[in-house]
Image (cartoon, helix red, strand yellow):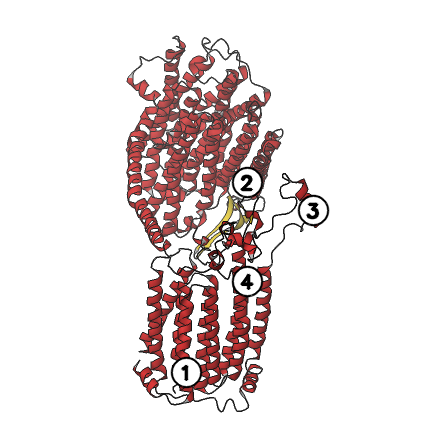
Amino acid sequence: MIELALAVGQTQTPEAVMFWILAPLTVAAAFGMLLVKKAVHSAILMASVMINLAIFYIAQDALFLGIVQIVVYTGAVMMLFLFILMLVGVDSSDSLTETITGLRPIAITAAVGFGGLMVSLLSRATLGRSAVGLQVANENGNVKGIAQLLFSTYVWPFEVVSALLITAALGAMVLAHHQRLQTRPTQRELSTERFRGISLANAAGLPAPGVFARHNAVDVPALLPDGSPAANSVNATLEARGDMLNSGAFELGKIDTSAGEEK
Amino acid sequence: MTTSNSLVYLIALPLLGAIILILAGRRADKWGHILGTLMSASSFVVGLYQLSQMLGRSNQARPVTQKLFEWISVGTFKVDAALLLDQLSICFVLLITGVGTLIHIYSISYMSHDHDRRRFFAYLNLFIAAMLLLVLGNSYLNLYVGWEGVGLASYLLIGFWNQKPAYATASKKAFVMNRIGDMGLSFAIMIAFASVGTVSFEGIKEHVHHTSTGALTAIGIMLLVAATGKSAQFPLQAWLGDAMAGPTPVSALIHAATMVTAGVYLITRSSFIFDAAPTAQLLVVIVGAITLLFGALIGTAKDDIKKALAASTMSQIGYMILGAGLGPVGYAFAIMHLLTHGFFKAGMFLGAGSVMHGMNDEVNMRKYGALRKFMPITFATFGLGYLAILGVPPFAGFYSKDMIIETAFNSGGTKGIILGSVTLLGAGITAFYMTRVMILTFTGKSRWDEEVHPHESPLLMWLPMAVLAIGSVSSGFLLSRGDALVNWLAPLFEEHGEHSELLKPIVVSGLALMMVAIGVAIAFLKYSRQEVASVAPEDVSVFTKIARQDLMQDRFNEAVFMRPGQHLTQVLVKTDEAVIDGAVRGVGQMAMGSGALLRGVQSGFVRSYAALILVGAVLLIAAIWVVTN
Amino acid sequence: MDAANYLYLSVLLFTIGAVGVVVRRNAIVVFMCIELMLNAANLAFVTFSRINGDLNGQVVAFFTMVVAACEVVVGLAIIVTIYRSRRSASVDDASLLKR
């Protein structure tokens, strides 16, 4: 810690300025990830952490990695995260109360121990040794330098990693693939089934959702003639996710304007 | 030593028969008995062939061996599965296969109404194979295999009608008592290996002079224990009477002619050990003497014809054991008595079976009487066997038994006089109880129930009886003519020196015949002159009562061994439960307890596992921190 | 400025990521925390590269990114599959292993 304080005191270079501004931001964003309730917010904070890291990479003469970090991580990977979040439910927010007894104290104690020990080890290992710097290594440009290593020393791991990527893509496809046990019913079969069924109640199709045009009402059940909400007018996924609004709130005569804002 | 490739067929043929009959199951019901008989008969033919080969060789070159395969090879301990056929084994081979085949033929008819006749023949063949292995093995270990094999066959056959609980118990009793003897044999083998380093007859015979008398005595006593178990000698005699639960052909073959004489074979085969261990030899004589009186006394009180004959068997084997215990001078006579006894006792058992066959399986002699008229052939063959066992000249028993009595008298000193008197007394009692059997069964007035219609047995049954009767008449004369058997066996045994001649043979014969005459006369007075009650009278002397209860042998065993054994077992069970099971359960409970504790960790929550990994990482880094400090 | 400061930052981010994996229940957030740990490691690699003056560290970081990408693809597919059958993205709901 004393060394850290000394380092703060020695802030002189532009890099140091950048570091002491961005590093607290990064740590704060990372902490935020843990503390916010909504997964989307976590994802945004994660993206900011990654952008900060990209800047750190560039600041440390790792231009290529910095760009890749932004393109691959902040671009592709975080998009993928957001995409899945949309699929699973953007709005669902987590409760932060711990359900497993004693887990949180254990985790925090372990984390503090881990961090403390690592910092202690690091300080022991690196103190008194100044960085060599990459001026020499990056003589022909960072990209060329990395390319030279990648296609000479690391060509075999490089190829293996490409195989890993393909395998992962295939794996994801297999996992996401939904095995259909029967052939998909045709339009004709569906309509036959509808009319030959026990009840003709839904023969004309399920009721459409929505009460009023003033509201994007795909999550609001339609009202039946007797005034009760028709549950089967809303998509089953929305219902299962608990995103269905109470159509009673839109009943004629007592329009509750706050119901729309609640979402 | 001459080798041969055909010895194995002696055993293989009946063994093959047993395997086929057991594996074929009910499919073989129609022809199983014929196959079994053929296998036994072909083994007998192989035996005759071997005899003819043997007769063609000089005296010293007669033994032949056949090595089957290397059985055990551990360090210096090497045992081959090998067969040895010498002058002694050939006698047994011919007795076993010959009498065995006759009894197979007899059983075809005797067991014809039995649902499981095929299984019976399978067991009989198994017995023949095991008994042949017993007498053909060239080492104690090979002998042991056959020894256990005949024990198994005996167990299976005594309990052949195991649907009756009493019979099943009888087979179990025979098996358990035989185990005690078998334990003796296994100890003998172990001691032999430990002290001599080999278990083959040949090897031990060579080393016997370099071995301490103590070790030889121990081996001898253990062999004697084995012999008492298998041959129903004192003190392991109690199983033989109950073994009569088996079908009568079994009693004739296994419990009269062959298996029970295995003890005599064992002692004779081990002559080189007993000759070098006088203490063990003395014990053999004592056991033989006790048993011959013991069996004879039981025989006087038995009303069950088979049990009377079983008691007689016990007594006659006592003679053989006594003869074998007298040393080189007695071995040949023991074997001779064994062979003649094989004929006349098997014949009498078959006769008893024939009587039972005609009397609705009644075994109580008090329910017989006057059967002479109804079963003339049975009476004739049984009568010849009777004369043979009594030792009436010129029947078989006269030659063999008188030789033993004479040898006993001439064994020297007080011992000779005691042994001679015992054997003479035994001869007298034998005459008494055998006459009693004859009178109760065949003469006097009929005492059977009304629904019984006695009739003569069919040809297949009386033919073997007739053949055995011929043997009972002639075998003694043929075997002793010109000392045929003695000279035949002589190369196997040590030369015996001159022995004192206390009594001349003619005197001994006269004494024996006198005793026999007295025994017959008493029996005649007691059972022929008076009316015989069809129910055993209760107001008899205390001696009769004791004799009826097999001289208290079962009570003794129960009081001295069984009850304390049971108590010991109960104590051991409790100890086992408390201490050993307690320890085992304790270990189990410890494992379960620690498992229950650790199960809490396995919550199924991924996050708790992740937390554990994190804790592990912290510990690892802490270790690095400490190490690099 | 001492390059070691980046390492301290890396340790801090890694620790935060580790805590996140243990503490958060939403599978996607847990996953993001794993990504955070990987990125923290990457930062350390880049810093080591600078300290040692050669580009090996950067190449390793590059490989880490590829592996992380693979992991994200498969991991998210697993999350989707679990979500499809359980209608839940909570890692605590997939705790049938103990039963």
C42 relative position to B598: left or right? right
Give percent across and percent down for residue A76.
55, 72
B23 relative position to C92: left or right? right
Q: Residues within 10 Å of mark 3 (few under 14, many from 20)?
A: few
Give percent across and percent down for residue B50.
57, 40
Identity of the residue drawn at 57% across and 67% down: A168
Task: Give the mark toward the camera: 4 or 2.
Answer: 4
Q: Amino acid at mark 2?
A: Ile
Chain at numbered mark 3: A
Q: Give how far apart the Cα atoms at labels 4 and 2 are.
A: 74 Å
Q: Give how far apart the Cα atoms at labels 3 and 2 are.
A: 80 Å
Q: Which quarter of the rendered picture does the C terminus of chain B lie within?
A: bottom left
Q: Amino acid at mark 4?
A: Ala
Q: Residues within 10 Å of mark 4 (few under 14, many from 20)?
A: many
Asked if one can make out residue C21 in the rendered structure from this viewpoint, the answer is yes
In the rendered image, residues at marks 3 and 1 fall on the same chain: yes
Q: Give how far apart the Cα atoms at labels 4 and 1 are.
A: 36 Å
- Residue bearing the label numbered 2: B11
B412 relative position to B155: left or right? left
Q: Which mark is residue C77?
A: 4
Q: Amino acid at mark 1?
A: Phe
Task: Give the mark toward the camera: 3 or 2.
Answer: 3
Q: Which mark is residue A19?
A: 1
Q: Secondary structure at mark 3?
A: helix
User: Height in image: B161 above or below A56?
Assistant: above
Chain at numbered mark 4: C
Q: Which mark is residue B9?
A: none
- Residue bearing the label numbered 3: A189
Whether residues under marks 3 and 4 lie with C-beta atoms below 8 angstroms apart, the answer is: no
